[in-house]
Image (spheres, rainbow, N blue to C red):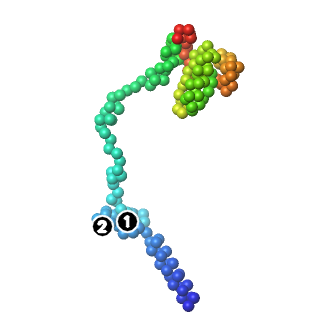
Amino acid sequence: MKIFKIYILVLLFIYFTMTACSGPGAVRKGARTKKSPDNGIAMNENFDPATLGEYKIDDADEKEAKTTFYNINQFIHSDAKDSVNSDELVSGYRVQLISTRNEAEARTVKLDAMLSFQSHIYIIFDNPYYKIRIGDCISRFDANELQEIAVKKGFNEAWVVKTKVFKQPKSLEEK
């Protein structure tokens, strides 16, 4: 009797294994099928990507987007142009006091720097960081001196960064 039960269980196991691993199920009626030249498996060719439910693009918005142009330089240099006499940018150095993700902290450091330094102060947003930089130094030597002054005034993490600076900044009294 035990052998008979084992024989039945083995036959059921083989049956379920064969039916589960037998390949693709029945193809829908009316579906176009094509035999693959590689292995002879029938493929369903009724897939239509247009039925995926994509959003329709509105032509009115597209036309408006094409006709609206912005000069990125106006946005980048808008604050700096107010405080300088020349728009000529040259390669130079600035001292970066802080780089933070917190806008309130950046504004606080900027106010502290305005009280501590007699040089131009820049707040730069480089997503996601707010960077506070001071000075327009043409030489690395001048930037190092400014960094030493910043460290003495309590900005312990100040460091020199190479960037574009204004060649002839306005004096701070003309602001």
Q: Amino acid at mark 1?
A: Ala
Mark 1 burial class by Cα count in 10 Å: few <14, some 14-19, many 20+: some
Residue 107 horizontal/vertical position (percent): 56, 25
* Quadrant of the rendered image containing residue 94: top right
Q: Secondary structure at mark 1?
A: strand
- For this orientation, the residue located farthest to the bottom is 1
From the viewer's perspective, tell me whether residue 100 is left or right of residue 19: right
From the viewer's perspective, tell me whether residue 88 is left or right of residue 24: right
Instruction: Name the residue tied to disc 1.
Output: 42
Residue 71 horizontal/vertical position (percent): 42, 24
Instruction: Name the residue tied to disc 2.
Output: 29
Residue 123 horizontal/vertical position (percent): 55, 23
Q: In the displayed structure, would residue 87 be above or below residue 97?
A: above
Mark 2 burial class by Cα count in 10 Å: few <14, some 14-19, many 20+: few
Q: Secondary structure at mark 2?
A: loop
One can see residue 137 in this view: no
Residue 132 horizontal/vertical position (percent): 58, 24
Answer whether labels 2 and 1 touch (C-beta < 8 Å): no
One can see residue 119 in this view: yes
* Residue at the (39%, 69%) spot, across then down: 25
Q: Amino acid at mark 2?
A: Lys
Q: In the displayed structure, would residue 96 be above or below residue 1?
A: above
From the viewer's perspective, tell me whether residue 86 is left or right of residue 31: right
* Residue at the (60%, 24%) spot, across then down: 109
* Residue at the (33%, 59%) spot, across then down: 46
- In the picture, the quarter occupied by the N terminus is bottom right
Foreground label between 2 and 1: 2
Instruction: Say which of 52 and 32 sits in front.
Output: 52
Q: In the displayed structure, would residue 69 be above or below residue 173?
A: below
Q: Which mark is residue 136?
A: none
Instruction: Say which of 44 and 170 sits in front.
Output: 170
